[in-house]
Image (cartoon, rainbow, N blue to C red):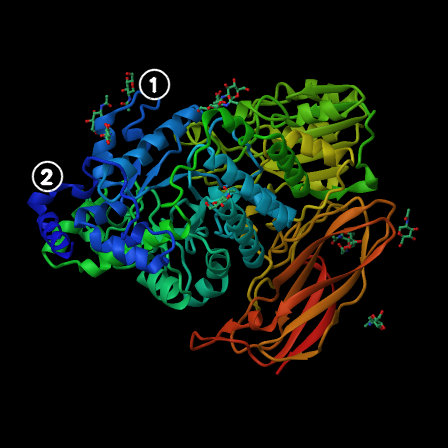
Amino acid sequence: MALRHFLLSLLASSSVLAADDRGHGNQPGHGKPNPSNGVVYKDPTADVESRVKDLLSRMTLSDKVSQLMQGDVGNWMNSTTNAFNVSGLIDSMASKSGSFYVGYPVPQQWIAENVKKGQDYLLHNTTLGIPAFVQSEGIHGFLIENATIFNSPIAYACSFNPDLVEKMAYAIAQESLALGVNQIFAPVVDLARELRFGRVEETFGEDVHLSGEMGYSYVKGLQAGNVSAMVKHFAGFSMPEQGLNTGPVHGGEREMRTTWLPPFKRTIMDGGAYSVMSAYDSYDGIPAVMDHHLMTEILREEWGYQYFVMSDAGGTDRLCNAFKMCRSDPIDSEAVTKYVLPAGNDVEMGGGSFNFKTIPALIESKELDIKTVDTAVSRVLRAKFAMGLFENPYLAAPANKTSKLIHTPEHIKLARELDAESIVLLENNNNLLPLKKDANIAVIGPMADGFMNYGDYVVHLSQYRGITPLAGIQSASTGTVTYAKGCERWSNDESAIPAAASVASAADIAVVVVGTWSRDQNELWAGLNATTGEHVDVNSLNLVGAQAALVRAILETDTPTVVVFSSGKPVTEPWISKKAAALVQQFYPGEEGGNALADVLFGDVNPSGKLSVGIPTDVGSLPIFYDYLNSGRSLEAGGLNETTGELEFGHQYVLGTPVPLYEFGYGKSYSTFVYSNVTLSQETAKKGDTVTAKVTVTNASGRDGQEVVQLYVSDLIASITVPNKVLKGFKKVMIKAGESLEVEIPVKVEELGLWNIKMQYVVEAGEFEINMGTSSANLTGPAILTVQ
Ligand SMILES: *[C@@H]1O[C@H](CO)[C@@H](O)[C@H](O)[C@H]1NC(C)=O
Ligand SMILES: *[C@@H]1O[C@H](CO)[C@@H](O)[C@H](O)[C@H]1NC(C)=O
Ligand SMILES: *[C@@H]1O[C@H](CO)[C@@H](O)[C@H](O)[C@H]1NC(C)=O
Ligand SMILES: *[C@@H]1O[C@H](CO)[C@@H](O)[C@H](O)[C@H]1NC(C)=O
Ligand SMILES: *[C@@H]1O[C@H](CO)[C@@H](O)[C@H](O)[C@H]1NC(C)=O
Ligand SMILES: *[C@@H]1O[C@H](CO)[C@@H](O)[C@H](O)[C@H]1NC(C)=O
Ligand SMILES: *[C@@H]1O[C@H](CO)[C@@H](O)[C@H](O)[C@H]1NC(C)=O
Ligand SMILES: *[C@@H]1O[C@H](CO)[C@@H](O)[C@H](O)[C@H]1NC(C)=O
Ligand SMILES: *[C@@H]1O[C@H](CO)[C@@H](O)[C@H](O)[C@H]1NC(C)=O
Ligand SMILES: *[C@@H]1O[C@H](CO)[C@@H](O)[C@H](O)[C@H]1NC(C)=O
Ligand SMILES: CC(=O)N[C@H]1CO[C@H](CO)[C@@H](O)[C@@H]1O
């Protein structure tokens, strides 16, 4: 066996022969998969490392390279006719058999059938029978027609409910697996720290801790359902220069370690994720896809991550065509491979030049060490063995069972529950909300009807399926519900506004739904208008087109008005906060969004969402995250005096404020929660201790409600500049009307550290302030913890 392996490697490593010999081990074979008799890698009782080693020793160089490039079901499935192209299958599997992508907007069974054809071929028609990762998207629902669409990550992060997120991910796994998909490109644990960036909606918001908890829960849920997670985008991706997609990110090692990496570490290491996707950007001048320090020194050597990293679509080519680090016309594939593979990016996604095809030539010319290739391949195989893919490669359900697995009543119910818990009540003057069911309601606005305002990463034509705000309100109301669009979301045309105002005037209550919009995975790239989503960045956070005029006109009627922001990121129209009777933030909904909104508006659900991202008064105040470093956010605000109409000049800013209009963690309830002071289980502690902080929360209202109790820590004196405060724990609790609850949140002292001037992680002795409360700016305390 060793000799055969040696000879085959020699053959495959000759660049001339390699072309003819591509995929030797994956060439059509004859016969069934070998029973495991004596073959270690086929023996499920053997340990993973032995199986990896054994299999690797049997692989030719081209077998190995084939594990490192992503294939695509489009090579054997015609996505308009479902015609099977057998030579396309054989061809594709010869060079790209480790994984293949199936995120096409086609009928469900086309995917199931063609996944089966791919896995069948690998198992029965190749010598080694290595099953593939079958990959698709799923940040808020599996990307296939009629699968359950949950609300966007920026939204469900507002639920502060990790249990529901875990259930959602488990549901996504069940729906994916029903068609044989075993790997999903999610979760996204980038942080929304640059709100102009189009992909804010794909994140869990601005906060390090919340993002880590959401990512962790997502991975736990997905992988419990036997689908592997691919955590993205590693790392530091989402604060691009000028907010422009894939633009350079500025920052240093300390910021990387303090802010960007902790959510990844929590999600990847504690969550046990089987794969990671590298990011498109460069951070401090180093493209993530070739960042040896990040992917090898930190991810592998410091954290101990055992599995693989895959580039994003076309991400490797960017070294030449975006970063100008190699010749781009034609792409210098050898240069790309030499940058990427030794740095620790093991697998190349499609969408680019498949630069890894040059691996054999680079081995031959000794520019690349075979050990580097073996390491990368081992990581891929390790993930496959660890998740049980060899034992259970056919995960798809029979066609006549998929409807019991996909878009089930339980999943639809979960989507509604999660959505309702994610809605954030921003204002509720004179307790206008909840509305009476028999009120006559005028529903107004372009986001209220006619399409579903989903965020990006939904399958083509999804917008026509789901419960709109109008439909949700209609089905909950016992009164008369009228509707006027008022304007198109993309238009300046104000001509329909007066008619909408008349409709509002005739009703008891007006509900105006305005905001931003994105597009599905096809339309987004087809040049259609949108204001958020991947590669859709803005330099203003104001309402677009005639929407602001529409809101103004409705607010000028005598009808009490609820404004709903249906959006993928904060909208900055502070005047609406002052003038509207109530203001509700519903970040991009799921398919039950209209019902969830109605649940909250009519009080069937008491709102409990808290902002996963702060809302500034204006785009000019960015960044708006609450955990700014000490010395930040000096305040001497100026602005328009609303009483006198005069300008009042300040300095920070001259005519504005750096303070968010609504801070991270903010959100009202129909209940009123009163916090007692904070106590600690111990007031002095050592590094290894876990201290429990306790606060009593009283529901001083006649209505049961859920509250997200938040705990923030401030390091009072530190050897470097640290954040003024950071969220270190939260707990969502139900408190019955009139009752009090003692809420305990553990704080691990080892998590109170910082990256010191020598770039070492240390917990410094001294005093830490612990505050608990209802938002990042409304806290009780402090309790002082002295770390010895
Ligand atoms: C799919 O089939 C149609 C109809 O035969 C053909 O026009 C189209 O080019 C095919 N698509 C691909 C990607 O081969
Ligand atoms: C089938 O696949 C082969 C090999 O990839 C390709 O050359 C051919 O154009 C494909 N045929 C069709 C009809 O798409
Ligand atoms: C999706 O749902 C629609 C409407 O219920 C139905 O017409 C269509 O056949 C479904 N498609 C699949 C693939 O289930
Ligand atoms: C795979 O092998 C079987 C026989 O074992 C054969 O019938 C089948 O045609 C092969 N499939 C392909 C795509 O070559
Ligand atoms: C996951 O796979 C294991 C092992 O094959 C199996 O026992 C379990 O039932 C599977 N769970 C789901 C949800 O598919
Ligand atoms: C489902 O299909 C399988 C064949 O794939 C068949 O044996 C089974 O009886 C079918 N079940 C139902 C409920 O139709
Ligand atoms: C925006 O896109 C829609 C299609 O979704 C189109 O009907 C409309 O004309 C476009 N408007 C502008 C101004 O681009
Ligand atoms: C606005 O001006 C009035 C009258 O000078 C003053 O009493 C009030 O404090 C000002 N308001 C603010 C917010 O500065
Ligand atoms: C702080 O939150 C409580 C509810 O817990 C609320 O009653 C109070 O008005 C808030 N204070 C401020 C300044 O927002
Ligand atoms: C905190 O609460 C305890 C128990 O209710 C009380 O004894 C103590 O005085 C409170 N401390 C402060 C500073 O309010
Ligand atoms: C209806 C009800 O239970 N109301 C109670 C709400 O909570 C306050 C404060 O604890 C009590 O005083 C009310 O009786």
Instruction: Give the labeled residue for mark 1.
Output: 81
Up the image or down, 110 lies above or below 394; here it is above
Q: Position of residue 362 (x, y in %)?
A: 14, 54
Is the CB of mark 1 within 8 Å of ligand 1?
yes
Q: Nearer the viewer, mark 1 or mark 2?
A: 2
Up the image or down, 260 lies above or below 549; here it is below
Is the CB of mark 2 within 8 Å of ligand 2?
no
Q: Residues within 10 Å of mark 1 (few under 14, many from 20)?
A: few
Q: Is residue 456 visible?
A: no
**Relative to 319, is 136 on the left or the right?**
right
Q: Position of residue 755 (x, y in %)?
A: 48, 72
Instruction: Give the labeled residue for mark 2.
Output: 20
Which one is earlier in the sequence, the residue at label 1 or at label 2?
2
**Disc 1 and disc 2: Cα gap in Å?**
31 Å
The reply to whether dot 1 and dot 2 touch (C-beta < 8 Å) is: no
**Relative to 736, is 106 on the left or the right?**
left
Along the viewing direction, whichever of 427 and 191 lies nearer the viewer: 191
Q: Residue at image x 72%, y 22%? A: 474
The kind of secondary structure element at disc 1 is loop
**Relative to 16, is 379 on the left or the right?**
right
- Specify the farthest residue to the front: 37
Q: Quadrant of residue 109?
A: top left
Along the viewing direction, whichever of 648 and 341 lies nearer the viewer: 341
Q: Amino acid at mark 2?
A: Asp
- Specify the farthest residue to the left: 16
Q: Amino acid at mark 1?
A: Thr
Along the viewing direction, whichever of 526 and 315 lies nearer the viewer: 315
Q: Residue at image x 42%, y 45%? A: 244
Q: Quadrant of residue 715?
A: bottom right
